[in-house]
Image: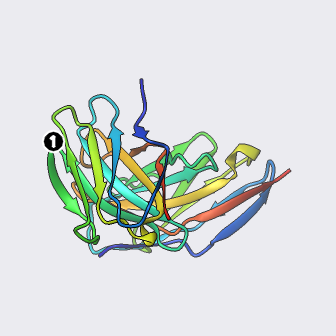
Amino acid sequence: KAGVTQTPRYLIKTRGQQVTLSCSPISGHRSVSWYQQTPGQGLQFLFEYFSETQRNKGNFPGRFSGRQFSNSRSEMNVSTLELGDSALYLCASSPGTADGYTFGSGTRLTVV
Amino acid sequence: AQTVTQSQPEMSVQEAETVTLSCTYDTSESDYYLFWYKQPPSRQMILVIRQEAYKQQNATENRFSVNFQKAAKSFSLKISDSQLGDAAMYFCAYRRTGNQFYFGTGTSLTVIP
């Protein structure tokens, strides 16, 4: 059974640019969540999608957005990148709303 | 908002020994779930163990077990017969049904050969 797949693994962008990260959940998982992980802030929740609807949203500026497609694949977009957006972005999927997450390997974003 | 506290930023254990990682959480809810995740240097977060709050019995998974004290809001992880492959960052997490996960700041575990 394939795991959660995140692409790309590494990304280098320039300040002011925008970026799109992709996440393919485990087949059958309808819930997809995104987290930002940094050494200083730990794991911070970005948002959760369930059956194409955003169900929960963390405390991030509007530059961070996401969506989920009918096949449960999800994308996360960050516009007008700032240096502070450099982080590991983790995607996680789960079958339902009370289950544990299965995480992807993350996308390491570096903003220069 | 719920908070999860891991008061031990770093821990070390001799190979084959037992180590306990601490976690406390704050909630006013009675129905929730608790988790321990492991993040090795490969950076992929791996689910170690899961506990339902309504179950009094402590969860176990092979060498991993928890001590769940609901009244004290404590959820510690015990690793028995530690192995070199157990070296990783360990995160405690809390979740209510339909809500996001709340993670602690992590405990870095070193296993000494």
Q: Chain of mark 1?
A: A
Q: Position of residue A26 (x, y in %)?
A: 34, 32
Toward the top, the furthest residue is A1
Q: Position of residue B15 (x, y in %)?
A: 81, 50
State the residue in front, A31 or A64: A64
What colour scheme has been applied to the protein in the rendered image?
A: rainbow
**Residue drawn where x is 76% and y is 46% of the image:** B84
User: Is residue B72 found left or right of B16 in the rendered image?
Assistant: left
**Residue drawn where x is 15% and y is 41% of the image:** A51
* Residue B83 visible in rendering: no
Q: Quadrant of residue A102?
A: top left
Q: Position of residue B44 (x, y in %)?
A: 53, 46
Q: Is residue A84 above or below residue A53?
A: below
Q: Residues within 10 Å of mark 1 (few under 14, many from 20)?
A: some
State the residue in front, A7 or A95: A7
Q: Quadrant of the N terminus of chain A?
A: top left
Number of callouts: 1
User: Is residue A107 found left or right of B1 in the rendered image?
Assistant: right
Q: Which residue is mark 1?
A: A51
Give the secondary structure at mark 1.
Answer: loop
User: Is residue B63 found left or right of A39 in the rendered image?
Assistant: right
State the residue in front, A42 or B14: A42
